[in-house]
Structure formats: structure tokens, C-alpha cells
Amino acid sequence: MSFTIYDASAPVFTAALTNMQGWLDKALAEGKSEAALMEARLAPDMRPFPAQFQMASDSAKSAVARLTGIEAPSMPDTEASFAELKARCQRTIDFIQSAPQSAFEAAETRTVELKFPNGSGYRFEGGGYLTGFALPNFFFHVTTAYALLRANGVAVGKPDFLAHLGPPNITA
């Protein structure tokens, strides 16, 4: 059995979005101010914390849609609480998991076009789109959300970023 575009996309997106939900639970369990975190930014010209979740969600669902030819659900960027951010992550996970693995067949050569409002954009084959754009863009927003929590005193660490792995499966 070969490693496929499905293997490199759907489970990766699902694992990271699931981990992100856990980070929100951790922040609340530590008594961090949800209101303050919702306004947090790494720099004045960056979008705030909720936007990082929204853009991670958009990146994942758009990648799956473009790679499979399935229409992604619309999700307006209206989340104003951790509960709403968690629900958005779950809706995204549900969409990803609803895409049949068979829909990813031939995705590595499927033409993907990204067009920006100014008319410029990129044309990729599916494999190049996933590895050169979709995954890096997704993890930019995932990592930014993580960094915002960390910078604001939430005790997240690498085990939280890699929580999908579970406990080590090799013991001394």
C-alpha cells in the first residue's frame, strides 16, 4: 500500500484541529482570561487569536475540497468564544471525515487554482498544492494560535502540539 494524498492531508488536518480544541480546554482549565486571549495578537498588524483558528479551519476544509472536488461548507468568521472556536474545529473535522478516501484518488495531479481578489494567483497540481501551499499555510495558523496561547501564559508545550500521538509507544 502506498502513501497517498489522503494520508498526507485528511488525517494531518484532523489531528491538528483536534489538538487545537484541547489547547482551548487547557487555557480555560488554567483560568486564563478568555476575553483577553480572544484579543491576543503577536504583532499589531496580525489578525487576532480567533482568526488563527478560522484560517486554520478554512485552510484545511479548502484543501480537502480542492483536492477532492467536493464543495466545502461555508463558515462565516463569527466565532466570539472558545466554545464557538471548538465547534468550528469540530465542524471542519466532520467535513474532512465526510470526504470519502476514494475522492482523493488522482488528487496528486488534479489542477488546483487559487485566485486572489486582484486577479493574480497560483496554479498547481494537487500534490504540489498540498505540500507547497496548503500544509504550510495551515500550519502557519496552527502554530500562530499555539504561540499566542504560549505568549499569554498558557502552559502548552510540544506534547500539546503533538497530542494526537498519545503516550510514547516505546518504553525503556
Image (cartoon, rainbow, N blue to C red):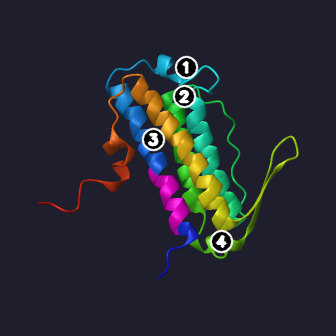
- Drawn side of residue 94 relative to residue 108, left or right: left
Q: Which tag, 1 or 4, sits closer to the chain's start? A: 1
Q: Is residue 53 above or below residue 139?
A: above
Q: Amino acid at mark 3?
A: Met
Q: Is residue 52 above or below residue 94?
A: above
Q: Amino acid at mark 1?
A: Glu
How far separated are the C-alphas under marks 1 and 4? 39 Å
Residue that numbered label 1 is attached to: 39
Based on the picture, tell me whether residue 10 belongs to the magenta stretch.
Answer: yes
Residue that numbered label 3 is attached to: 20
Residue at 61% over, 75% down? 102
Q: Which tag, 3 or 4, sits closer to the chain's start? A: 3
Element type where label 1 sits in the image: helix
Question: Is mark 1 in CB contact (under 8 Å) with mark 2?
Answer: yes
Magenta: predominant secondary structure element?
Answer: helix
Q: Which tag, 4 or 2, sits closer to the chain's start? A: 2
Which residue occupies the foreground of this view, 89 or 40? 40
Residue that numbered label 2 is attached to: 49
How far separated are the C-alphas under marks 2 and 3? 12 Å
Question: Is mark 3 in CB contact (under 8 Å) with mark 4?
Answer: no
